[in-house]
Amino acid sequence: MTKKIIMTAAAMLIVVLAGVYAFRHQESQAEKVAAPAAAAAVDSSACIGSKEYMRANHMRVLAEWRHSSVREGNRVWVAPDGRKIDKSLNTCLNCHSSNRMFCFNCHMYANVKPNCWNCHISPMEAP
């Protein structure tokens, strides 16, 4: 009886490890695919709006950026002052990644569950 349990546990472990390996291998293959090049004159070094504007509208901005980037292939946003900014979570994380809890603290406080990390690597998971 004990031998059956050990064999079953070993078989389950092998299946789990194979799944993890396949998932990791798939991730590494996806990383090798080159991202589309952004426009040459893109400046993503500054926030796209004031603190007040971003607090009120960040979800709207992210939703619009996601739609136009993914569905329409438009990867560059032109700010009111003429700056061209890459439509990417990396643009946001260039400044806000210094605090790994930046997004999570506000979302926890507001009791919202964003789905950004369904596709993107969370700052909490980054090395």
Image (cartoon, helix red, strand yellow):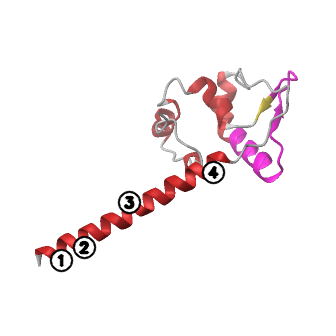
**At which x and y percent is residue 105?**
46, 33
Tag 1 secondary structure: helix
Pointer 1 residue:
4
Tag 4 secondary structure: helix
| Residue kind at label 1, given as amino acid type | Lys
Pointer 2 residue:
8
Q: Which residues are magenta?
A: 60-84
Q: CA distance from mark 3 to mark 1?
A: 20 Å
Mark 2 touches mark 1? (CB < 8 Å) = yes
Which quadrant does the N terminus fall into?
Answer: bottom left
Mark 3 touches mark 2? (CB < 8 Å) = no
Q: Which of the pair 65/22 is nearer the observer?
A: 22
Pointer 3 residue:
17
Q: CA distance from mark 3 to mark 4?
A: 20 Å
Pointer 4 residue:
30
Residue at the image position 50 percent from the left and 39 percent from the top: 107
